[in-house]
Amino acid sequence: MADTEFLTGAAETVKRWAAKLWTEMPREIYFGKFMKENDSNAIIEVKRDLDGTTGDQLTFTLLRKLTGGGVTGDDVLEGQEEQMNHFSDTVTLDQVRNAVRLKGRLSERRTAFDQRMSAKNVLKTWLAEYIDDDCFTQFTTGTAASRIVYGGDAVSTATIDSGDTLTTGKIESIVAKAQKADPKIWPVRVDEGDYYVMVLHTDVAYDLRQSTNWIDHSQEAGPRDYGKNNLFTGRLGIIGGTVLHAHEKVPVATTWGAAADQSGATNMFLGRQAGLFAWGKRPEWWEKEFDYGARQGFAIGAIYDMTKAVFDGVDHAVIEARTYRTSN
């Protein structure tokens, strides 16, 4: 029986691996659990309108709710119509790529299939982390002062001290702030319930779990089938209708406080359409041979953009919570 040879760069092989990559990528991206395609009822709304077409910009539209009182009884409606108010935000696509080149047949001493698998895994992880880093940066950059809160009694990063940790009460006060904001920060509807999301630094999550009332406040019931909704995957708990998550890449600081010696973190409270994400070209896979077939190279790339939603100059659905963190 002849051995099966996996030829680097074979068209059908590349196509098959590219399709597999596209299927696996959403699970690799941390923020993927908060994304929904063509659905504004999501923390991050995703569009693929430009996938496979020309153009490098895509516009997202937000309709503001109507504020008029309408008419009653037999009052004439014609001429009393209310104008729809809407705002738009634009994402501008860019390309990102990376590649690995193997040393050669003698030094690698692996089959082509093993090489391809190893390359796919490291490149897939790289792209997912690149997109996640982009999301963290976007959500915590250029936030308006009116959408920033501080732990404890602090009023700025310069006044933060070890007593200004995140508490269950602070989370509930942020929920109240979101509901009273203009425009209101809307939660995501899941079944019959409404939920916000808050992503904490892992140190902040540790501090929160040490509070005496953590158990009492973190066990709110979610929807009956919450296990089927990615919004709840990996959650720490639910407080005030806010699904808590933790990640080590939430931005941190070590120079807060009056003496610039306090550790802190910029935690993210997110509502519906907090982020806008567009694929211009979904993740692609390339393979190439060098040196007369003695060396192989593998590459990954995508065209996309991610931005924090800002409508009419206002952060649409993001509140930053800057708190002290115990550096573990």
Image: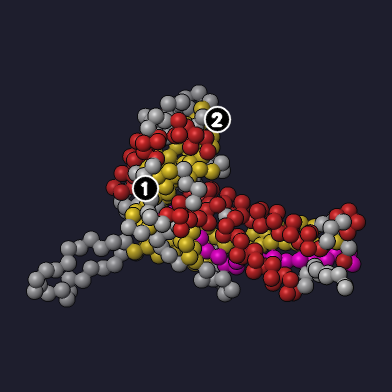
In the displayed orientation, state which residue is furthest to the front: 1
In the displayed orientation, state which residue is furthest to the left: 74
Residue 26: image location, x then y, percent: 57, 59
Q: Which residues are magenta?
A: 272-292
Residue at 37% in and 62% down = 62
Residue 241: image location, x then y, percent: 35, 47
Q: Which residue is mark 1?
A: 221
Quadrant for residue 172, please give it: top left
Residue at 72% in and 61% down = 299
Q: Is residue 280 shown in magenta?
A: yes
Q: Is residue 177 left or right of residue 10?
A: left
Q: Pick the quarter of the image with the C terminus.
A: top right
Residue 194: image location, x then y, percent: 34, 54
**Whole-number angstrom distance, CA of label 1 to CA of label 2:** 31 Å
Disc 2 on helix, strand or loop? Answer: loop
Q: Vertical placement of 44 versus 220: above or below?
A: below
Q: Which class describes the residues within 10 Å of circle 1: few (<14), some (14-19), or many (20+)?
A: few
Q: Pick the quarter of the image with the N terminus.
A: bottom right
Q: Which mark, residue 164?
A: none
Quadrant for residue 117, please give it: bottom right
Q: Which mark, residue 327?
A: 2
Per the picture, the main secondary structure of the magenta-coloured stretch is: strand
Q: Nearer the viewer, mark 1 or mark 2?
A: 1
Disc 1 on helix, strand or loop? Answer: loop
In the depicted view, which residue is nearer to us: 297 or 235? 235
